[in-house]
Image (tube, helix red, strand yellow):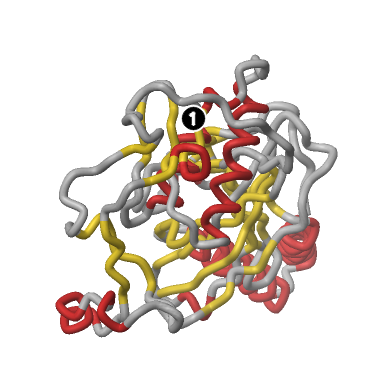
């Protein structure tokens, strides 16, 4: 392919912005240099020996080389990058993204992509070929390692091509504005529940008013009573959802609180402990409340994602 320099010419690009001339870097390949050398040799031969055929050969090679190089540049020029899907990611795992590239005549383009770390150019991942879905919409799945929880910026994206005739290496290094939420690493542990004082009544329970009100909707399970089905939502979305009613929540079993760990000073370790309990409650379909110093995450639609996101920035 080509050799990297110590400082990469990284270009900033926004979501939905098309790749322009300012983003593209062009280098001739060995074959491209050879074609120009053959064209120059034919021209010199024609000058020295007045061979008309050599003139024609020289111009033909030069014209073909210029046309092929323009086609190589157009492989990358004008394409638009979109992030279409981001898989759930926990600290220490690879963050997986689905990237869609839009443009004209994508079936004729042969693009390779990968995420790179400019500070670690010795361990470069393999490049992934863009998968063509149709003539204007193609996608590729890329991943990068994570080393911390929180809101993480996606690494530099390299796009490379040498199609159609390998006369040029056309590539770019793009820093997008994409961000990924990395959840804490769940750590299995044993713990002793502390005495929660805030929000408790005399019986040691959190009491919610309006016990007949719907707290949130969840996916309907066959084991649940038919009367819990949200028929209005079914009529709109054609999906079976179960009505979860507001009820009294036992503090000792349903509140996942930072105050359960008074002897854990590390926020990372604390977030990992609570993350494990959130995932356990979600797996067992148990109602729970996540208590953080600045907020309560109550039972609601999308509670899992909201709880894990809160823990990622805790």
Identify which residue, 232 or 191, lies in the foreground.
191
Task: Determine the image quadrant of residue 291.
Answer: top left
Position of 48 relative to 117 (above/below): below
Percent across and percent down for residue 106 are 47, 75
- Left or right: residue 313 versus residue 228 is right
**Identity of the residue drawn at 59% across and 31% down:** 193
| Residue 45 image-quadrant placement | bottom right
Crowding near pointer 1: few (<14 within 10 Å), some, many (20+)? Answer: some
Residue at x 68% of width, y 64% of height: 128
The single residue placed furthest to the right in the displayed view is 122
- Looking at the image, which is closer to me, 20 or 262? 262
Q: Where is residue 247 in the image (x, y as percent from the top left)?
A: 30, 52
Question: Which element carries disc 1, helix, strand or loop?
Answer: loop
Q: Up-down: is 44 above or below 239?
A: above
165 vs 266, nearest the viewer: 266
Number of marks present in the image shown:
1
- Image position of 62 (left or right of 195): right
Question: Is residue 180 in view?
Answer: no
**Horizontal side of residue 62 vs 231, given as left or right:** right
Residue ranking furthest to the front: 203
Q: Quadrant of the N terminus?
A: bottom right
Q: Which residue is drawn at 34% across and 43% down?
A: 298
Looking at the picture, tell me which residue is in the foreground, 49 or 256.
Answer: 256
Specify whether residue 48 is in view. Answer: yes
Q: Which residue is drawn at 51% across and 38% down?
A: 252
Place residue 64 in its image quadrant. bottom right
Q: Residue 305: horizontal and vertical position, in percent?
A: 44, 50
Q: What residue is disc 1 on? A: 313
Where residue 35 appears, as percent x and y from the top left, is 74, 64
């Amino acid at each position: 392919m080509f050799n990297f320099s110590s400082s990469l010419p990284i270009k900033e690009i926004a979501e939905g912005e098309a790749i322009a001339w300012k983003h593209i870097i062009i280098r001739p390949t060995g074959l491209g240099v050879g074609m120009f050398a053959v064209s120059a040799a034919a021209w010199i031969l024609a000058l020295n020996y007045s061979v008309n055929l050599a003139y024609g050969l020289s111009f033909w090679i030069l014209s073909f080389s210029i046309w092929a190089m323009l086609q190589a540049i157009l492989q990358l020029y004008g394409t638009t990058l979109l992030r279409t899907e981001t898989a759930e990611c926990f600290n220490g795992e690879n963050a997986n993204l689905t990237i869609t590239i839009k443009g004209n005549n994508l079936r004729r383009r042969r693009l390779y992509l990968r995420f790179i770390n400019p500070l670690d150019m010795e361990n470069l991942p393999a490049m992934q070929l863009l998968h063509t879905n149709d003539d204007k919409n193609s996608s590729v799945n890329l991943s990068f390692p994570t080393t911390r929880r929180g809101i993480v910026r996606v690494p530099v994206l390299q796009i490379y091509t040498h199609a159609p005739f390998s006369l040029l290496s056309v590539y770019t290094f793009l820093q997008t504005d994409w961000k990924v939420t990395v959840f804490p690493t769940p750590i299995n542990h044993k713990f002793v529940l502390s005495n929660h004082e805030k929000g408790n009544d005399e019986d040691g329970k959190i009491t919610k008013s309006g016990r007949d009100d719907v707290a949130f909707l969840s996916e309907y399970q066959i084991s649940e009573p038919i009367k819990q089905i949200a028929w209005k939502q079914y009529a709109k979305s054609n999906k079976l959802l179960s009505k979860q009613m507001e009820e009294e929540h036992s503090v000792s079993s349903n509140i996942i609180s930072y105050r359960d760990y008074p002897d854990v000073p590390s926020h990372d370790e604390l977030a990992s402990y609570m993350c494990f309990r959130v995932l356990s409650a979600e797996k067992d379909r148990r109602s729970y409340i996540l208590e953080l110093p600045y907020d309560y995450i109550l039972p609601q639609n999308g509670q899992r994602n909201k709880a894990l996101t809160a823990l990622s920035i805790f």
